Image (cartoon, grey):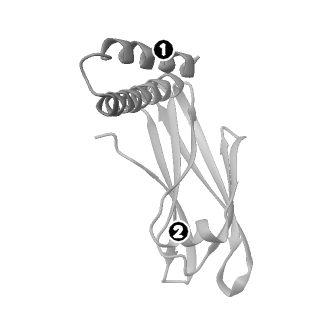
Amino acid sequence: MRTLFLTGILWLSMLANANTVPAADQLEQLKQQVIELNRELFLLEEELLFPPQTQLAVFVSVDSGQFFQLDSVELLLNHKPINAHLYTTQQWSALKRGAIHPLYKGNIKAGEHQLTAVFVGKGPDNRDYRRAVSYPFTKAEDAVLLELQINDRSSDYQPDFVVQPWSND
């Protein structure tokens, strides 16, 4: 339907401008109009699918990754699995360089919730590591944006897992 709509707009625009603008300029104008329309449709679709009143977004970040190498993360909301991700070598490398991975984006009802993230990977001395961190929160009118941080704790050479809320200000 979206393609048919865009095609119709293209034809109408071409007919309206047929006698006033050279063909190359007309084509470039149409191209720009389609790009702008596509952008607006994408933004509208995002707003309809994930309205701020119901939105929950979860991101993963790493400070340096010396004491932990992430293999996977499992995400639970109110003790029910909502997402899981296996990390490739390239993704882990990007996280160590400062990238932030958008792990989950979805809709939830207003009220009390508990987010639990289970991290699996290799800890100090290449030992298998499985740690969970839980974060209770209240969903109100604004979107809830949470960052799962994997930090190195140099005091005891262990990884530290923290849930950090992002402010909407």
The spot of residue 59 in percent (x, y) is: 52, 52
Residue 19, numbered circle: none
Mark 1 against mark 2, which lies toward the viewer? 1
User: 46 and 36: which one is in front?
Assistant: 36
Residue that protrudes farthest toward the bottom in the picture: 125
The spot of residue 43 in percent (x, y) is: 42, 29
On screen, residue 42 versus residue 93, left or right, reads left
The spot of residue 140 in percent (x, y) is: 44, 27
Q: Residues within 10 Å of mark 1 (few under 14, many from 20)?
A: few
> Identity of the amino acid at label 1?
Gly
Which residue sits at x=33%, y=40%?
Answer: 168
> Identity of the amino acid at label 2?
Ala
| Figure quadrant of the N terminus | top right
Residue that protrudes farthest toward the left in the picture: 20
Instruction: Relative to 156, say whether 145 is above or below.
Output: above
User: 4 and 15: which one is in front?
Assistant: 15
Distance Cα–Cα, label 1 vs label 2 = 42 Å
Q: Residues within 10 Å of mark 2 (few under 14, many from 20)?
A: some
| Residue located beneath label 2 in the image | 94
Residue 8, numbered circle: 1
Instruction: Relative to 80, say whether 125 is above or below.
Output: below
Instruction: Relative to 35, say whether 90 is above or below.
Output: below
| Figure quadrant of the C terminus | top left
On screen, residue 34 versus residue 60, left or right, reads left
Which residue sits at x=46%, y=30%?
Answer: 42
Which residue sits at x=48%, y=20%?
Answer: 6
Going from the N terminus, do you reach mark 1 or mark 2 first? 1
